[in-house]
Image (cartoon, coloured by chain):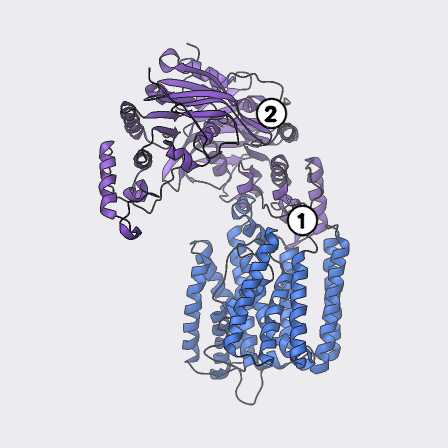
Chain colours: A blue, B purple
Amino acid sequence: MRPALSLRDFSLVIALVAICAFFGWRAPEFLGPRNLSNLMVELSLNATLAMGMLLIILPGHIDLSVGSGLALLGGIASVLTTKAGWPAPVGLALGFVAGVVIWYAKSWLIVHERIPAFIVTLAGLLVYRGAFWLVIHNETVPVVAGGQSNVYSLLSTSHLSPVMGYALAALVTIGLAASFAMTQRSSEKSEAAFLKMFIGAQAVFLLVIVANQHRGIPLPALVFGVICMATYALTQHTAMGRYLYAIGGNAEAAVVSGIPVQRVVMTAFGIMGGIVAVTGFLLASYTGNSTTDLGEWMELDAVAACVIGGVSLRGGRGSVVGVLFGALIMACLINGMTLLSVSPEYKLVARGLVLLAAVWMDMRVNRS
Amino acid sequence: MNSVILRAEHITKTFPGVIALKDVSFDLREAEIHALCGENGAGKSTLIKLLSGIHPHGSYDGRFEVNGAEARFASIADAGRTGISVIYQELALVEEMTVAENIFLGREPKRWGGLIDWPTMFREAKALLDRFQVVLDPAAQVSSLGVGQKQLVEIVKALGKDSKILILDEPTAALAEHEVLVLLDILRDLRKRGIACIYISHKLDEVFAIADRITVLRDGTSIVTKSAADTSKSEVIKHMVGREINDLFPRRASTPGEIIFETKNLTVRDAATNEDRLHDISFQLRAGEVLGIGGLMGAGRTELLMHLFGAWGERRSGSVSISGKAMRASKPADIIREGLVLVSEDRRRYGLVLEHEIGFNLSLSSLEQFSSAGFINQGRETTRNRHFFDSLRIKATSLQATAGKLSGGNQQKIVLGKALMTEPKVVLLDEPTRGIDVGAKIEIYEIINRLTAEGKAVILVSSELPELIGMSDRILMLHEGRIGGEFSRAEATQEKLMAAAMGHVIGATVEQ
């Protein structure tokens, strides 16, 4: 497969360690169990969305509408649950189905009518935000009536018990080992691959130990973990994943190679719709309600996570692990700056500069 | 006799592994139309690229003289300043601009402050168009013009720069009959004004209608230069192709089986231009047979293959069948499943995902074979990849090597391997040996032999006549989108094929 270890992998790890060390030094509570638990939830929100974004960028498209979209889909579920009084699971299910259907339909404009994804999703960014305000009547709609709890609110407040956490870590390790074994038969770089698997498993156990010191693994982190591993399997072990890389690498060759390009891209958008819905539910649940500015700029954070993680905006290059690191770097930066009481103005400037610096470095590394 | 305005002496130009021009000498006189003829790949384009500064001075041996002084072009602009303008087959006009803007592109008349002087530009454009008797509105947008009119804009643009030497590369390839006549009239008029012209064309009728002298290039050498009055079409054709066929072509005879693939009366329209490009194409293909398809550039060879593969054109009439069943599929993905596969002439564009590994590319069309529930069985994939990697003798460190970094021959083998892994019945090969070295060529020919021995049928499109004759059991020549002639291997000669490609009736022109 790809080169097992590249300078890129190390540069991301080094950047992440440096950022964590800096915040740990200036704000010791950064590395405390309580904050790390928060960080896990914040990471999960952005990183879940970034996984979807990877599936869109790999074949050379982009989706700018996800920030508004997740607000809308979360808002639909909030209104159905709290205002219309429907059972929360029904509200959530309808929001999810709406996401998949809307995104799949939208991709038809991109794939068959050949309107650039940038334009279609830019329109979506505006339309969904407007639709969201209509749905919530410009009010703040809670995910559950005051003082109670339902499936929707529990999405972000539940945690896994310590025992379940360890069981999960064991499960993940088995999964990683299985993936390792599957690639082993095709790849010759076994030491590097084994090292990666080993470190991955270690990281998961460490995560569980730290989380268990607070309240256990938060449910959003579990949701993210599942989506992350599913995306990994999709990109690395399925024909569709190969096709996504091939379409982004050379769309004309992909057609001539007999790849059903249109169907593959539409499926990727459909999956993105589902991921947007899930992210919308998690965010509304974490915030406690659907408010007008929910999800603003999250599309840019998702794109930033991808780009920092080495995904090429022209398509054809990028990996789940890279995006994970990109999202981690973004999440740590934002969280750390909040702890240091950096004002929002400077936070925005810093986020922009980090994105720019990451792409600049990436291009220099690639050129040399 | 007029004085020599341009002289090329002992020009030799090599590309890595290929000698494109070998000791070519050539001269152009004032007020002369000098035609340059030769097969595809004879070195005409390379010569033009040297003359126009695309390949700068220092990248070749020999010398050019313009008006008696040595010319050393470092760039296209440099050649332009010396008075040389080239009009290429693919026009270089900005579609969204007006005729006048295009004529003055890059040298717009300016007012103070650098603002464009629009009235002057339109006035001068009008004056230029009038001077050469071109009836066109300088304010018309180029995208609204026909191909012939665009060609005229290009010529006026070149003349507006006071060019003394005009080089036209296949200027009539895309023109309709009456547009050709207009163009030829304009060239005759330019000749009266003392402008010299190098005219490159496959169409010998035009060449003889307009040229004063004719030079034939073959295999990168200038074979002969003659006054048009002293030669004939058949002599020119002979000089163009007259080369020995050696045993570079190891075609092993096979006994064709039953008909495996058939097209009936195919007429296909180019969706982009809304014109029919292929007319009434009917042929049959037998198992174990190699059907060669030849023709000049633009004859429709590639279009035919791309259409059969569902990647080009809109079928207006006709039908295609494989193994006796009508093919209904219209997309490459489905057509591959029916047993037809294409190896494109442009492997970097249509063949490979260059930044990925060999293995990724080899199995790309066949992933369904070793997937269950969408998941790839990577063990089986690797086994299959390794089989093709070894049997095609792809020279690379491993299956993990990046495809884009390999030589042309090895890249071609990957594309072939990808096609063959789909287990096709019919393989369409479009210029499978273009740009690869002799050793790799012979390996590709051996692969073709192996395929037919296994009972597969091959369609081989090639612009090299020796390759067509050497490797095909039967040959179709296309001429302007129609079948211009069909030849068995025994009766095919380069002269007959070339005559058929040019639309001449065999016997009437060649054996007079």
x, y percent for residue A359: 56, 60
Vertical position of residue A111 compared to residue B319: above or below = below
Q: Residue at x 67, y 81 (%)?
A: A29
Q: Earlier along the polypeptide chain: callout 2 or callout 1? A: 2
Q: Residue at x 31, y 26 (%)?
A: B195
The mark total stands at 2
Q: Secondary structure at mark 2?
A: loop
The circle drawn on residue B447 is none
Q: Which residue is mark 2?
A: B256
Q: Secondary structure at mark 1?
A: helix
Q: Disc 2 versus disc 1: distance between alpha carbons? A: 32 Å
x, y percent for residue B235: 43, 13
> Is B131 left or right of B202, judged from the image as shown?
left
Chain containing the residue with disc 2: B
Vertical position of residue B51 compared to residue B358: above or below = above
**Discs 2 and 1 share one subunit:** yes
Name the residue at the front extreme: B69
Q: Nearer the viewer, residue B141 or B455?
A: B141
Name the residue at the bottom extreme: A147
Under mark 1, the amino acid is Phe
Under mark 2, the amino acid is Pro
x, y percent for residue B456: 61, 32
Q: Which residue is mark 1?
A: B370
x, y percent for residue B275: 36, 37
Please indicate, yes or no, whether residue B503 appears anywhere in the rendered image: no
Q: Nearer the viewer, residue B238 or B34?
A: B34
Chain containing the residue with disc 1: B
Neighbours of disc 1 within 10 Å: few (<14), some (14-19), many (20+): some
Looking at the image, is mark 2 or mark 1 nearer the viewer? 1
